[in-house]
Amino acid sequence: MIFYFTATGNSRAAAEALGNELGEKVADITEATRMCEFIYHVSEGEMVGFVFPVYFYGAPTIVGEFVNNIRLEGSKDPYVFCIITCGEKIAAADRQFAKMLGRSGLSLRCTYPLVMPNNSVLWYELPTPEQQVKMLADADADMIKISTAIRNGEVGSYSSGLGSRLKTSFMQSLYKHGRKTAKFHAEDTCTGCGLCARNCPIGAIMIDEKRPKWVAERCVLCLACINRCPVTAIQYGNATKNRRRYVNPILKKGL
Ligand SMILES: Cc1cc2nc3c(=O)[nH]c(=O)nc-3n(C[C@H](O)[C@H](O)[C@H](O)COP(=O)(O)O)c2cc1C
């Protein structure tokens, strides 16, 4: 069983590629959370994987909440791994995630960071289309190595250095106290299609008089609303106005 969370498709693409390779079922954490589906049966010998993007060198809030609620029945001590997709580095996100899993009685055996195109448009210009093609091809090659390692039941931690731990701890406090929605807004080019509201993993957006309205004070900060808007109408203050957006091809296929 492979659980994934995604905003712009990278983690879903990785989870589905792995699911096909290993013959494991794939479940979307956003859907499972919406449906309050937290109990899963794991057969003896079945693997349990989590695939999600790194945010501020840690796990997205929705992933932490899912792991906090999950109950796995059947196999006593399944092989648990995670793949953390990132634009560059995960610091000690795996350590933080191992602690989260530990509170639900699961032990993380192995972590695989996977560099994919960056979607953090609030802070950076995103890769060009040409760079995206190259990064996705590299990620496909990395996934072949990762699935072999997982199939072989590899064990080991990714990061444990003090520098990584400090980075994660500092950046996670920014994430915890940030995530405010006040600066999100739609420009006049907005068509009121409602895709942003449907794509928001926590229902923080409502459509009011054909315009999105952010109704929660804080969100996951996944940036699906900004990156997946078909007419690039959603902005965050002045930060995102002239920047590219990113969506993984898996979401463009409409699969
Ligand atoms: C709020 C936020 C914070 C991020 N923080 C990091 C980070 O700390 N390190 C990093 O390498 N990438 C970071 N990224 C980039 C994403 O982790 C990366 O693009 C990921 O593959 C997106 O996955 P998705 O397409 O499944 O949503 C961040 C993205 C967002 C939206």
Image: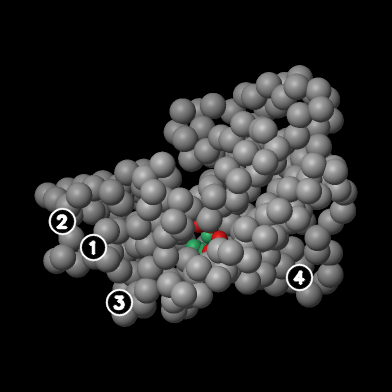
**Structural distance between the alpha carbons of marks 3 and 1:** 12 Å
* Along the line of sight, the residue nearer the viewer: 137 or 172: 137
Q: Tell me which amino acid carries mark 2.
A: Thr
Mark 4 secondary-structure assignment:
helix
The disc at residue 231 is 1
**Crowd around label 1: few <14 · some 14–19 · many ≥20 (10 Å):** few
Quarter occupied by the N terminus: top right
Q: Tell me which amino acid carries mark 1.
A: Val
- Residue assigned mark 3: 241
Expressed as whole percent of the image width and height from the top left, the position of residue 167 reads 70, 72
- Residue assigned mark 4: 164
Q: Tell me which amino acid carries mark 4.
A: Ser
**Structural distance between the alpha carbons of marks 2 and 3:** 17 Å
Q: Quadrant location of residue 49?
A: top right
Proximity of marks 4 and 3: CB atoms separated by less than 8 Å: no
Proximity of marks 1 and 2: CB atoms separated by less than 8 Å: yes
**Crowd around label 4: few <14 · some 14–19 · many ≥20 (10 Å):** some
Quarter occupied by the C terminus: top left
Vertical placement of residue 117 versus 107, above or below:
below
Mark 1 secondary-structure assignment:
loop
